Amino acid sequence: MMNDEPRYKPLAASDFFEDGQSARPQVAGTIAHGHLRLDQAFYTGQLNGSLVETFPVPVTRALLTRGQERFDIFCSPCHGRTGNGDGMVVQRGFRPPPSYHLDRLRAAPVGHFFDVMTNGIGAMSSYASRVPVADRWAIAAYIRALQLSQSAPLADVPQAERQRLQALQ
């Protein structure tokens, strides 16, 4: 009967197998349920060894809102709320990160930001264990929005808003 079968604590000793172990090693190539990562661009920020240029998820207002929330929590202490690299940690004496508004980072593929959050770079450690994959893409989208906010031409501003801004000058 099932209720009379012996059970073992994980990695406890056992006389059932010749090696005295109760647990068996995982079969090579085993993937836990729900952890199959077929979408290389989504999970790595790369496709065929190159950083992705476009988002592997739709960029929506909800994604940007989530990205701003996550950015304010995880990124702004160093990068500042506007991405200039002047966050509270920097104001307390730590080395400043580069501004997101540098030409080289505005020109960087979006996969770069995902990769840096995943693997870290320079003084920044990996955030892969703290920020889920979907949130890393949300943050990357928000970084792009920050970059646009600092360098958008007047022609990109809706006509009604443009008139309001011109009236303030």
Image: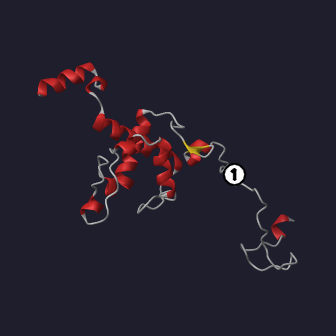
Q: Give me the residue at 43% from left, 61% from top.
A: 122
Q: Quadrant of the N terminus?
A: bottom right
In the image, residue 157 above or below residue 126: above
**How many numbered marks have been drawn onto this rendered protein structure?**
1
Q: Is residue 136 visible?
A: no
Q: Nearer the viewer, residue 156 or 68?
A: 156
Q: Give me the residue at 38% from left, 41% from top.
A: 106
Could you say where residue 147 lies in the image, as x and y percent from the top left?
34, 40
Could you say where residue 52 lies in the image, as x and y percent from the top left?
54, 40
Per the image, the residue denoted by label 1 is 33
Q: Nearer the viewer, residue 121 or 168?
A: 121
Q: Amino acid at mark 1?
A: His
Q: Determine the image quadrant of residue 123.
A: bottom left
Q: Give me the residue at 83% from left, 70% from top.
A: 4
Scheme by which the image is coloured: secondary structure
Q: Quadrant of the C terminus?
A: top left
Q: Determine the image quadrant of residue 94.
A: bottom left
Q: Is residue 141 visible?
A: yes
Q: Crowding at label 1, few (<14), some or many (≥20) Cα neighbours within 10 Å?
A: few
Q: Secondary structure at mark 1?
A: loop
Q: Determine the image quadrant of residue 159.
A: top left
Could you say where residue 64 lies in the image, as x and y percent from the top left?
40, 38
Could you say where residue 102 lies in the image, as x and y percent from the top left?
33, 45
Q: Give me the residue at 28% from left, 56% from top.
A: 87
Q: State the residue lying farthest toward the top.
A: 159
Q: Nearer the viewer, residue 106 or 25?
A: 106
